[in-house]
């Protein structure tokens, strides 16, 4: 039986449509860690942290793509990163292409963030502080973003998968070292289908 706290997840920016793909044996804790460090400006992923600071918390949504066996996590994470091309700065926030060789534990992520937060930083001038404050005040989420966020959280978005999406999913599964069950393939397909439905709204 698959553990419903173990699986693949996505962090979506509802404004610029970029995504971060990850996997964890403890999804609830991983979500908590991501958002805690982002809120405190201490996340080890500088690209994701910059986007969070620019767009604001309301523009980001954490969603479980599929629940998996622990042994399937890294292999499916790699294929899904390839599928979404989230390693490309134009499409996502992942810093690595192959998580199998670079996967960090929650403890490592915490240590990296603590190290980053403890680094000596050059103090901002009063002028710089003023500009950052004004920029933060001017961040407003569009009605479209609010609507998309609301829909993404209801889990009711469904639609047919296009042939192009089917082709990409098929290519992502090619050359796998360990075959996935039909049920796992179906779940990943549905998750990607919902993602593309969101992008087209």
Image: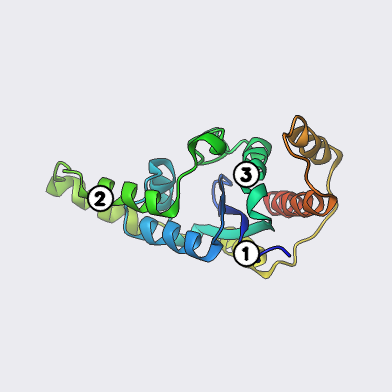
Q: Nearer the viewer, residue 103 or 153?
A: 103
Percent position of residue 107, x then y: 39, 54
Give the Cα distance between marks 3 and 1: 28 Å
Percent position of residue 92, x then y: 55, 40
The secondary structure type at the circle numbered 3 is helix
Q: Are marks 3 and 1 in contact (CB under 8 Å)?
A: no
First along the sequence among labels 1 and 2: 2
Q: Nearer the viewer, residue 109 or 190?
A: 109
Q: Nearer the viewer, residue 145 or 177?
A: 177
Query: Is residue 198 in view?
Result: yes
Give the Cα distance between marks 2 and 3: 28 Å
Q: Is residue 172 above or below residue 38?
A: above
Q: Is residue 146 above or below residue 50?
A: below
Query: Is residue 13 in view?
Result: no
First along the sequence among labels 3 and 1: 3
Q: Which residue is mark 1?
A: 147
Q: Which residue is mark 2?
A: 117
Q: Tell which tag, 3 or 1, sits nearer the viewer.
A: 3
Give the Cα distance between marks 1 and 2: 34 Å
The disc placed on residue 77 is 3
The answer to whether residue 47 is left or right of residue 169 is left
Percent position of residue 168, x then y: 77, 35
Label 3: how many residues lie within 10 Å, few (<14), some (14-19) or many (20+)?
Answer: many
The answer to whether residue 57 is left or right of residue 12 is left
Q: Tell which tag, 1 or 2, sits nearer the viewer.
A: 2
């Amino acid at each position: 039986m698959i553990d419903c706290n173990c699986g693949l997840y996505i962090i979506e920016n509802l404004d610029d449509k970029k995504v971060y793909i990850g996997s964890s044996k403890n999804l609830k804790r991983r979500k908590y860690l991501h958002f805690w460090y982002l809120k405190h400006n201490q996340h080890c992923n500088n690209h994701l942290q910059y986007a969070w600071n620019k767009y604001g918390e309301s523009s980001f949504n954490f969603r479980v793509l599929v629940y998996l066996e622990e042994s399937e996590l890294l292999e499916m994470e790699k294929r899904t990163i390839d599928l979404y091309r989230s390693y490309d700065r134009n499409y996502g926030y992942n810093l690595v292409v192959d998580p199998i060789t670079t996967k960090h534990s929650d403890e490592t992520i915490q240590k990296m963030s603590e190290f980053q937060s403890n680094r000596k930083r050059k103090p901002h001038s009063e002028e710089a502080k003023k500009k950052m404050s004004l920029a933060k005040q001017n961040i407003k989420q569009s009605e479209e973003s609010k609507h998309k966020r609301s829909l993404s959280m209801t889990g009711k978005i469904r639609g047919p998968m296009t042939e192009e999406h089917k082709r990409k999913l098929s290519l992502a599964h090619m050359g796998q070292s360990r075959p996935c069950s039909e049920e796992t393939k179906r779940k990943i397909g549905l998750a990607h289908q919902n993602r593309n439905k969101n992008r087209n709204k």
